[in-house]
């Protein structure tokens, strides 16, 4: 049977990670081009950098929830073999999809955080082209949030299927024994 405490803890971690990813999308850095005091140079002025922290917080919380699920299920490769049931086949497929969506979510969150933290430092002379004030594209953190949500659902189903396959009924007590009785 799946541990209810583990499912609750993982759910809370995933909900917080999702909330942080959505907040990171809402609070992305924006840049404006301003002239310096002497009107000789144009430079990029960036506003708040809070979404980098939100993105990294979501990154680490999702990683913590994935580690908890994998440790509880022994990463599907350690421990005794699972019973050959439909739950085992379902657990194998969900394990693969869980890791795929986890890697995509982590890549979106990390790339968005790194790109949001990057600020162009150069200035240009007023007569030249204005500087390129690079910011993170709209939707990077939103994609990360979507994959956090999908990973959360898949990992919970994976753990439930794994637990069901691990504790499934084994006929004849689970061992191949010959019934011994008194011969008359």
Image (spheres, rainbow, N blue to C red):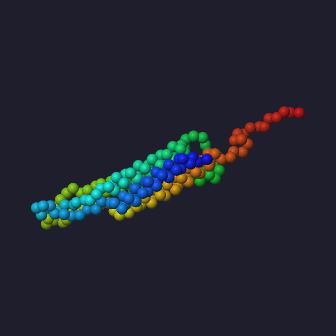
- The answer, for residue 75, to whether it is visible in the render is no
Taking the spot 47% from the left edge, 49% from the top edge, the residue there is: 65
Residue at the farthest right position? 184
Report whether 11 appears left or right of 89.
left
Report whether 18 appears left or right of 163.
left
Tell me which corner region of the image, top left, top right, bottom left or bottom right, holds residue 76.
top right
Above or below: residue 47 compared with residue 70? below
Q: Where does the C terminus fall, quadrant-wise?
A: top right
| Residue closest to the eye, 146 or 89 | 146
Q: x and y percent of residue 180 in the render?
A: 80, 35
| Residue closest to the eye, 87 or 27 | 27
- The answer, for residue 64, to whether it is visible in the render is yes
Task: State the count of labels.
Answer: 0
Tell me which corner region of the image, top left, top right, bottom left or bottom right, holds residue 16.
bottom left
Report whether 146 appears left or right of 175.
left
Taking the spot 18% from the left edge, 66% from the top edge, the residue there is: 129
Q: x and y percent of residue 87 in the render?
A: 62, 52
Residue at the farthest left position? 38
Taking the spot 13% from the left edge, 66% from the top edge, the residue there is: 127
Q: x and y percent of residue 26 in the render?
A: 36, 62
Q: x and y percent of residue 50 in the render?
A: 32, 55
């Amino acid at each position: 049977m799946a541990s209810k405490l583990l499912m609750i803890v993982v759910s809370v971690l995933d909900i917080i990670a999702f909330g942080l990813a959505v907040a990171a999308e809402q609070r992305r850095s924006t840049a404006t081009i301003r002239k310096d005091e002497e009107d000789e140079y144009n430079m990029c002025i960036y506003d708040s950098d809070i979404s980098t922290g939100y993105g990294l917080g979501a990154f680490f919380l999702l990683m913590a929830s994935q580690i908890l699920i994998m440790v509880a299920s022994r990463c599907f490769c350690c421990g005794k073999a699972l019973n050959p049931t439909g739950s085992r086949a379902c657990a194998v497929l969900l394990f693969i999809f869980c890791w795929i969506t986890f890697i995509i979510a982590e890549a979106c969150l990390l790339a968005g955080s790194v790109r949001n933290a990057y600020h162009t430092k150069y200035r240009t002379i007023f007569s030249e082209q204005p500087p390129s004030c690079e910011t993170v594209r709209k939707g990077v953190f939103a994609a990360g949030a979507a994959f956090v949500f999908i990973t959360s659902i898949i990992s919970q189903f994976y753990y439930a299927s794994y637990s069901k396959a691990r504790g499934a009924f084994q006929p004849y007590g689970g061992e191949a024994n010959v019934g011994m009785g008194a011969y008359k």
